Image (cartoon, coloured by chain):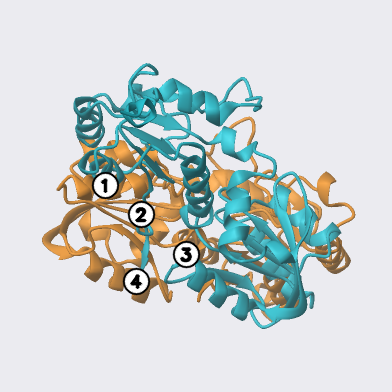
Chain colours: A orange, B cyan
Amino acid sequence: MEIKNMTRPKELTVQEIILHLTEGITLPENTVDQLITGSPDQFVTGIVVAFMPTQQVIEQAIQGGANLIIAHESPFYNHHSATDWLVNNSVYTDKRTLIDQAGIALFRCHDIIHRFEPDGITDGLIQELGWTTYLSGRTAESDIVTFPEGMTVQEIAQHLKQRLGIDYVRIAGNSEIVCRRAAVLVGFRGNGPVTIPLLQNEQVDLIIAGEGFEWETPEYVRDAVQQGKSKALIMVGHAESEAPGMKLLADRLEESFPETKITFVKEQPVFKVF
Amino acid sequence: MEIKNMTRPKELTVQEIILHLTEGITLPENTVDQLITGSPDQFVTGIVVAFMPTQQVIEQAIQGGANLIIAHESPFYNHHSATDWLVNNSVYTDKRTLIDQAGIALFRCHDIIHRFEPDGITDGLIQELGWTTYLSGRTAESDIVTFPEGMTVQEIAQHLKQRLGIDYVRIAGNSEIVCRRAAVLVGFRGNGPVTIPLLQNEQVDLIIAGEGFEWETPEYVRDAVQQGKSKALIMVGHAESEAPGMKLLADRLEESFPETKITFVKEQPVFKVF
């Protein structure tokens, strides 16, 4: 009889996973990261990692026997996860009931992963695109990539669609220019105050972003092209730009907790082009 | 000799046009509406009305001999038209030099037209869509339309594309449902705090909006459909939803100032889908 074979796998609590994620991270006072549902003391039966904790992601977690969901965004359609305005809303109450009855602990991992060094979400996207060797610089909110041979914006768009498994991207500016330097910005970092200084001061030809106000970066790029300057913008979608970072997080958690079943769930794009 | 035939057309100043536009309107203290360039005293040689005062719109105004541009959005890539962050930016300085050298007066008409009764931008969109007879209600930020026979979301999307002259719309939720009540929201009114109460309390099947955060309304609609509820969302684009209101403004100004050349300039959509 070998004692070591009888050792049960260590029972992990939600709190242990949270402590692992937040180790060495200083969160801002107004952080949105919190345990939104469930208890820190509950034992983890399995982990689902996702960009957005949709109704379908929660259903898949329950079907797979997982009781901890780690998600980048809020389940309740607002950045700060406020629920007071939703108490009489049937979509909210149906979702909440499902979560509570199944005993799902839902942990928001937004500010934490953006504070990894390097930013865990941007890092995930760069790795998914196979561009780690092209990385030539970093600013607080972007990675700068340099293409030694140059690529047209259309070639880059094609690469993005193929690697991210998406049906379309939106392009502003001149899609035929040969791009040598691009700035990659995930999520809602596609706004003018972030992108315009990059285009002006970092000799960037192309912005690749998740989402941003339509009257800022796209209009700047349109004007630049009308003035004869070679600039372009590719918007890939918020979720499309950030999901690879959560997939990378799932891979990392698997290495740290090899005895726990950890599944990354990728949602369909929320929009279809018609 | 008939004296009346020798009367010169009355020479209008920029200030007279501004007074006409703002008559009876109470603007908020922090209004973004202002004369951004030019002088209130200059005589108007012609008026260009546009949603966005792009480089190309300014060039067209100059070519057509107009020296007053009335635009809904800012020329400088931010809602409050701040320029301090752009002083060393060549796209800004090139655009600014063109405006100043041509003596263009640029008046922002954003808060004003949204305070017309009814909202001049929403009204323009409803008229452009041919839906005035379908109008069945109004909230502070939306028009509610009722389709007596019902229309599928795809049929409505097709109608939007045709009437607005656009190549694509983005749809979330179930595009096959038959819609009886839709809420129409222009510009950046597509966010959850505005749309979600309409979907829940106003028996609205469909939201038609310009632009909004991707993690709010689209994700709510996705969850609703996953729960078996019949909901959908069509995002038409910010400019696409608001340009018809500026076109209607141009028509109204032509009636009030029949001796002045007034031209509505429609820009191409800023994004192309690839």
Q: CA distance from mark 2 to mark 3?
A: 28 Å
Helix, strand or loop under label 2: loop
Query: Which residue is under mark 4?
Result: B274
Nearer-the-camera pick, B182 or A267: B182
Mark 4 near mark 1, Cβ–Cβ under 8 Å?
no
Disc 1 to disc 2, how far (Cα)?
Answer: 8 Å
**C-alpha distance separating marks 4 and 2:** 19 Å
Disc 3 marks which amino acid? Glu
Sequence order check, earlier mark of 4 and 2: 2
Name the chain under label 4.
B
What mark, if any, has residue B267 been given in the picture?
Answer: 2
Amino acid on which disc 1 is placed: Gln
Residue A268's disc number: none
Residue at the disc numbered 3? A240
Instruction: Give the CA distance from mark 4 to mark 1.
Output: 23 Å
**Gap between marks 1 and 3 measured at Cα:** 32 Å
Q: Earlier in the sequence, mark 1 or mark 2?
A: 1
- Near mark 2 (Cα within 10 A), the count class, few <14, some 14-19 or many ≥20, is some
Which residue is under mark 1? B56
